[in-house]
Image: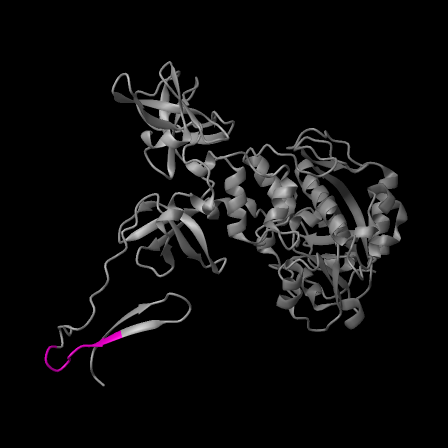
């Protein structure tokens, strides 16, 4: 008691093995006992060394390569397109035997040199080294190097004579096109057919027609992607077939394989671009949009879809262009028959039931009816394509589900409107209402629903999703009167898929939400009509399960 101790702990496995030595606190409190072990020297890792390190996400050790030694005894380790920073003396890093260092990352035997990079090659006749460019790497591992007007084939066993600048980075030669200036982002095709996005550096000597050297990660120059379609790549990221990508590390591997960009390793940046609706998981439509925005030239793998302007199956009510991925329009409805069908939709879904959410409107009385004053039909190529792809995946996901139930909505009592839109009850496709304000209406029509703001106005009784109703009376509780005296409501196509039914008075929101996000179900149907004699509430957690068909403007009628 009262003595100072020096503890040195190692963790070869999950058990701690402490070695303790006692300081003589009485004779020399500031000096350590001579028998106390000194702090061991830091491991001397070198750039290019292959190590095993512990991934907290995967909860296991994985392979990586040291590509930079930073300040404070830190190491930057790159694995599967992602960069990790750890201390050199961390027990989470393990050195590999020297025999395995020659095999390369992941234990493969592919050559270190890649097509398109610059190397130093020795000329026996000139007795000196020349700068050359790797023109070809044969399947046997032989390398053809071009320097000046000369071509030289270096067999696999003699490649030690070639000098490379860095085992992690590769230096490529980029030709400057006309109109480029420092800071311009260029798309460059390497000798092996890879497309890279590079930023032209600053420098007065950089003129059109000239060249400059650019440093890229070697894994961006490797062989072509191992996936034939985007659907195949998506399913690789979703091994449990939940319909979503949630494993960041697994996605990082695919991103490094698909995206030929020096920013592919910035996982946080890539994920923010990928998760458009902010729900923490990525659906297939979001994955396709991300891939196309990063110039991934692979087919989607969905029948009838061949790209952003491909052969999508459009609704029969579609009148806009079908080959413009940026097309988005709101069209005034003038057809009397169409307007009468929409008025009938309000009438048939009306229900004279009061809930406390009616207080949001500023009145306690339930309207006796709702009268349409203006009708707009929405068409968005981007949103429809996302919905189309999601519907295709859901139809295949539920075909073998035991105990699948087709749930009916109150809006399904109008067969003529359902035929107009070609709804598919086999995957629980409904027309539902979503009440909103004028201010939020524009944002939703332009950018679709955002799951990051889900529940901000309706609450989160069944989790943090988008809430819809099959009754205009319920949706009207969240609608606000605009400057023109009209209220607005959205009529949306909604994909329910495999529905998680719940009729509890006080449901466990987090448990219900997790059951959907884990892939067992695709939506929640909260039957408050049965347990509280009020309304049914439909909740989805993926924006691609909703497509906005109409924006309706109406007035509340009171007897």
Residue 164 coordinates in the image, percent (x, y) = 33, 32
Q: Is residue 279 left or right of residue 71?
A: right
Instruction: Looking at this view, name the residue that lies furthest to the left.
Output: 27
Magenta-highlighted residues = 20-28
The x, y position of residue 519, in whole percent, is 66, 57
Task: Work out which residue is located at the far top of the displayed protein and give it.
Answer: 149
The image quarter in which residue 455 lies: bottom right
**Outermost bottom residue:** 1
- Residue 96 seen in the figure: yes
Q: Is residue 340 above or below residue 541?
A: above
In the figure, residue 314 lies in which quadrant?
top right
Q: Residue at x 75, y 59 (%)?
A: 499
Q: Position of residue 516 (x, y in %)?
A: 67, 60
Residue found 69% across the figure and 36% down from its top: 381
Is 441 located above or below residue 182 in the figure? below
Q: Say which of 123 and 287 sits in front.
A: 123
Q: Residue at x 46, y 46 (%)?
A: 107
Residue 446 shows in the view: no
Q: Quadrant of residue 33?
A: bottom left
User: Which one is nearer the viewer's eye here, 505 or 138?
Assistant: 138
Q: Quadrant of the N terminus?
A: bottom left
In terms of depth relative to the viewer, which is nearer, 293 or 154? 154
Is 23 part of what is drawn in magenta? Answer: yes
Q: Quadrant of the C terminus?
A: bottom right
Drawn side of residue 200 relative to residue 484, left or right: left
What is the chief secondary structure element of the magenta stretch?
A: loop
Between 214 and 133, the one nearer to me in the picture = 133
At which x and y percent is residue 115?
45, 28
């Amino acid at each position: 008691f009262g003595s100072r101790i020096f503890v040195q702990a190692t963790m070869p496995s999950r058990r701690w093995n402490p070695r303790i030595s006692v300081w003589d606190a009485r004779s020399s409190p500031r000096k350590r006992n001579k028998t106390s072990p000194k702090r061991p020297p830091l491991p001397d890792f070198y750039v290019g060394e292959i190590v095993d390190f512990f991934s907290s996400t995967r909860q296991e050790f994985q392979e990586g390569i040291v590509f930079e030694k930073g300040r404070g005894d830190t190491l930057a380790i790159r694995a599967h397109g992602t960069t990790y920073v750890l201390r050199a003396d961390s027990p989470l890093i393990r050195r590999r035997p020297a025999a395995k260092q020659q095999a390369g990352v992941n234990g493969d035997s592919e050559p270190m040199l890649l097509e398109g990079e610059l190397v130093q090659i020795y000329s026996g006749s000139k007795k000196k080294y020349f700068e050359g460019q790797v023109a070809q790497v044969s399947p046997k591992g032989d390398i053809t190097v071009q320097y000046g007007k000369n071509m030289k084939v270096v067999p696999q066993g003699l490649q030690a004579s070639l000098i490379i600048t860095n085992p992690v980075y590769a230096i490529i030669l980029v030709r400057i096109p006309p109109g480029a200036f420092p800071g311009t982002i260029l798309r460059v095709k390497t000798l092996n057919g890879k497309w890279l996005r590079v930023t032209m550096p600053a420098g007065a000597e950089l003129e059109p027609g000239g060249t400059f050297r650019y440093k890229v990660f070697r894994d961006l120059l490797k062989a072509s992607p191992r996936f034939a379609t985007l659907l195949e790549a998506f399913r690789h990221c979703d091994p449990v077939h939940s319909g979503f990508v949630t494993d960041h590390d697994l996605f990082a591997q695919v991103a490094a394989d698909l995206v030929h960009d020096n920013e592919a390793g910035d996982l946080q940046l890539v994920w923010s671009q990928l998760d458009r609706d902010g729900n923490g998981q990525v659906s297939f439509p979001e994955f396709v949009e991300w891939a196309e925005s990063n110039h991934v030239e692979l087919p989607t793998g969905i029948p009838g879809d061949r790209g952003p302007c491909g052969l999508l199956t459009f609704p029969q009510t579609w009148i806009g262009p079908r080959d413009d991925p940026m097309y988005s329009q709101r069209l005034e409805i003038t057809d009397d028959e169409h307007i009468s069908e929409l008025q009938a939709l309000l009438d048939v879904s009306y229900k004279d039931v009061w809930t406390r959410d009616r207080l949001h409107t500023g009145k306690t009385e339930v309207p006796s009816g709702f009268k349409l004053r203006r009708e707009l039909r929405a068409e968005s190529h981007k949103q429809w394509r996302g919905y189309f792809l999601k519907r295709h995946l859901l139809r295949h996901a539920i075909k073998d589900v035991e105990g699948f139930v087709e749930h009916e909505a109150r809006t399904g009592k109008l067969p003529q409107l359902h035929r107009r839109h070609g709804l598919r009850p086999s995957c629980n496709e409904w027309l539902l209402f979503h009440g909103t304000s004028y201010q939020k209406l524009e944002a939703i029509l332009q950018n679709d629903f955002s799951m990051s703001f889900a529940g901000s106005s309706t609450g989160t009784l069944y989790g943090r999703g988008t809430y819809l109703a099959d009754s205009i009376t319920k949706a009207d509780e969240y609608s606000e009167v605009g400057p023109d005296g009209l209220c607005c409501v959205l009529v949306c196509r909604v994909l329910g898929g495999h529905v998680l039914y719940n009729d509890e008075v006080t449901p466990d929101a987090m448990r219900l939400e997790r059951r959907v996000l884990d892939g067992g179900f695709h939506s929640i149907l909260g039957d408050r009509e049965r347990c509280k004699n009020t309304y049914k509430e439909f909740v989805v957690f993926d924006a691609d399960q909703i497509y906005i068909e109409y924006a309706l403007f109406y007035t509340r009628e009171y007897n």
